[in-house]
Image: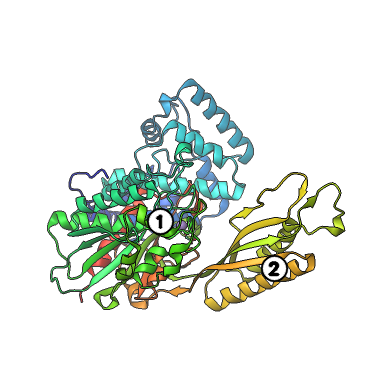
């Protein structure tokens, strides 16, 4: 991975201190232009003084917009200029500079025409201008093509979402303007952003050709990721770097006193099919960046740090999942080795082909007493922090889950001659039940049920479907709620199948218990985030994480980082900013400095 010269973002406490003490007029003058033609935003935010940090100031400004009534918010949106492919004499100096950085004025004639058409379509649909922070999540400028692509997909949003997305972009523009004004740039956050882009060059065949990211367990792309992460860890200055028997990349940074315990951290580097770049990998790169800084400064901490890039968490290639964290907690079931992927390659064969000896997996079990606990940084993968304009969130618990693979066997028969009351249609049975599953999960408010895979093998346009294969994933905040949900949904499935004379085959493939955060570790995250001047927001995790498996062996607590695009994840639109990554790095660093066994 590309590594830069030594660097660290320098906070600018003097500037914030000055702002806290300045007269309202002076402070307003300094904040002028941060929010386009809307001094009321700064005026209301200043009532929150004293600011504890630049991050706090950014939050207070965004909060002032959140508190405003929709008419004021609309006026703020309408104060923004249209994006243009050539200079517009009415642009504020800030907007002019930003549009220049994005290279919008170097658009080809075709791009310029497309921009105009999209602008017109957007205004016609919503009645307000399309706004995007043209410097993008990294801060170094979106290409004209990326801007056009963003416009094209945002054109499909609902008005409510488009409105909120515009406000989010306005906050991002303000963030970048403030960074300039304070000369405080997320240097490490930017590098970590680049590491994600670098690792995303490895993708499985069938996806790579389409510019999509997919890294399944032990494929050549997966092994290339492991090698790249291992090289990155070595370059960061870890004392020991290994790739273990299950494919985990493990880096250890020794403590000052070699007998001291370790903090265990990390997340996964495999991805879902056509997934995002940040899911999992952020939790590897954030601690790596911290180690690099400590190593450069020759700093040793009272505790050691063990960073694990987990090889498998997404359950894409084999039925079993959490393979990597299961190995660390001594819960790797040797019968999994016989599972086969879609091409008939067993897990045992795949491990051997990648140079691993499955017999060594049992020895990967960690001794919990040697660790303070497990912490994990992860992109939120949901809309909560995005909607609240909060860069970081404290995870209170991880929802429990259970997964099944199922097969419905009816009778394949002629589509033209089989009377409607004499069919055994696997798809119709599935459809009747799937709608029930959706409604039953909705009843709880915080349960979810998903059929993510659906297959009608050898289906034909003129044949009543005789066979249907599907997956089912159900989750809830407590195991009891998950089990009640699963019981109702599965009972209904049996009932529907009995009523239609359909044979049901069902296999439970994963069951993961809900994992409440350890109070002590959660408090440390809270202190670390508060120390950055940010307000605290607590939230449960709907997604599953390596932390829920590690929970079986040691205390765990997670930190969430806001995602862009309404927090979408398991989707190539998954994104986060260099600024939010920087805050995660700062929080991780602060967390580590607090451990003193
Ligand atoms: C993992 O991303 C999961 O929650 O399924
Ligand atoms: Mn995932
Ligand atoms: Mn993940």
Mark 1, residues whose alpha carbon is within 10 Å: few (<14), some, or many (≥20)? some
Residue 462, horizontal then vertical, whole percent = 78, 45
* Residue plotted at (31% across, 71% down): 365
Residue 410 placement: quadrant = bottom right
Residue at which label 1 appears: 349
* Residue plotted at (37% across, 37% down): 141
Residue 369 placement: quadrant = bottom left
- Kind of element beneath mark 1: helix
Total numbered circles? 2
Tell me if label 2 and label 1 are in contact, CB under 8 Å: no
The alpha-carbon separation of the residues under discs 2 and 1 comes to 36 Å
Depth check, front residue: 7 or 159: 7
Depth check, front residue: 382 or 257: 257
- Kind of element beneath mark 2: helix
Whether residue 180 sits left or right of residue 122 in the image: it is left
Looking at the image, the residue that sits furthest to the top is 109
Mark 2, residues whose alpha carbon is within 10 Å: few (<14), some, or many (≥20)? many
Residue 356, horizontal then vertical, whole percent = 32, 58
Q: Is residue 279 above or below residue 436?
A: above
Residue 457, horizontal then vertical, whole percent = 65, 51
Residue 106, horizontal then vertical, whole percent = 41, 24
Label 1 near ligand 1 (CB < 8 Å):
no
Residue 24 at least partly seen:
no
Q: Is residue 79 above or below residue 331?
A: above
Residue 171 at least partly seen:
yes
Residue at which label 2 appears: 493
Quarter holding the N terminus is top left
Who comes first in sequence, dot 2 or dot 1? 1
Residue 298 placement: quadrant = bottom left
Quarter holding the C terminus is bottom left
The scheme the figure's colours follow is rainbow
């Amino acid at each position: 991975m590309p590594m830069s010269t030594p660097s660290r973002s320098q906070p600018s406490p003097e500037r914030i201190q000055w702002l806290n003490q300045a007269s309202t007029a002076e402070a307003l003058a300094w904040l002028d232009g941060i929010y386009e033609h809307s001094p009321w935003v700064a005026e209301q935010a200043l009532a929150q003084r004293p600011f504890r940090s630049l991050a706090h100031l950014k939050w207070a400004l965004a909060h002032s917009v959140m508190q405003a009534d929709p008419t004021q918010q609309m006026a703020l949106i309408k104060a923004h200029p249209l994006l243009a492919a050539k200079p517009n004499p009415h642009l504020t100096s800030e907007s002019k500079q930003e549009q220049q950085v994005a290279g919008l004025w170097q658009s080809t004639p075709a791009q310029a025409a497309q921009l105009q058409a999209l602008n017109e379509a957007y205004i016609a649909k919503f009645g307000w201008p399309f706004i995007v922070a043209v410097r993008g999540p990294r801060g170094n400028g979106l290409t004209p093509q990326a801007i056009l692509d963003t416009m094209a997909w945002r054109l499909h949003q609902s008005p409510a979402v488009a409105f909120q997305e515009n406000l989010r972009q306005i906050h991002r523009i303000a963030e970048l303007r403030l960074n300039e004004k304070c000369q405080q740039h997320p240097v490490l956050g930017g590098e970590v952003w680049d590491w994600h882009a670098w690792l995303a060059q490895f993708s499985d065949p069938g996806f790579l050709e389409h510019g999509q990211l997919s890294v399944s367990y032990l494929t050549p792309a997966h092994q290339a990721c492991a090698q790249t992460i291992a090289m990155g860890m070595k370059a960061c200055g870890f004392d020991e770097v290994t790739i273990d028997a299950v494919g985990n990349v493990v880096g250890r940074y020794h403590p000052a006193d070699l007998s001291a315990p370790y903090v265990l951290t990390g997340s996964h580097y495999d991805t879902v099919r056509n997934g995002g770049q940040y899911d999992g990998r952020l939790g590897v790169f954030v601690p790596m960046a911290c180690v690099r800084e400590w190593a450069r400064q020759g700093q040793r901490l009272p505790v050691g740090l063990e960073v694990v890039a987990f090889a498998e968490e997404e359950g894409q290639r084999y039925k079993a999942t959490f393979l990597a964290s299961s190995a660390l907690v001594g819960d790797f079931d040797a019968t999994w080795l016989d599972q086969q992927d879609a091409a008939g390659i067993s897990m045992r064969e795949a491990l051997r082909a990648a140079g691993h000896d499955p017999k060594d997996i049992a020895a990967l079990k960690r001794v919990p007493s040697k660790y303070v606990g497990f912490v994990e940084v992860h992109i939120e993968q949901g809309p909560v922090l995005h909607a609240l304009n909060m860069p970081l969130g404290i995870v209170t618990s991880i929802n429990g889950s259970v997964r099944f693979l199922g097969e419905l066997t009816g009778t394949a028969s002629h589509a033209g001659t089989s009377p409607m009351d004499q069919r055994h249609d696997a798809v119709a049975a599935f459809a009747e039940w799937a709608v029930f599953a959706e409604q039953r999960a909705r009843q709880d408010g915080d349960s979810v049920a998903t059929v993510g895979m659906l297959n009608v093998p050898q289906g034909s346009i003129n044949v009543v479907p005789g066979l249907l294969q599907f997956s089912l994933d159900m989750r809830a905040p407590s195991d009891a709620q998950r089990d009640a949900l699963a019981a109702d949904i599965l009972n209904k499935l049996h009932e529907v199948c009995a009523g239609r004379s359909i044979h049901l085959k069902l296999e439970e493939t994963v069951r993961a218990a809900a994992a409440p955060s350890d109070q002590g570790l959660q408090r440390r995250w809270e202190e670390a985030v508060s120390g950055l001047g940010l307000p605290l927001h607590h939230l449960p995790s709907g997604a599953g994480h390596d932390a829920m498996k590690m929970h079986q062996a040691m205390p765990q607590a997670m930190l969430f980082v806001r995602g862009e695009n309404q927090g979408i994840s398991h989707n190539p639109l998954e994104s986060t900013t260099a600024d939010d990554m920087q805050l995660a790095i700062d929080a991780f660093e602060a967390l580590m400095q607090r451990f003193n066994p």
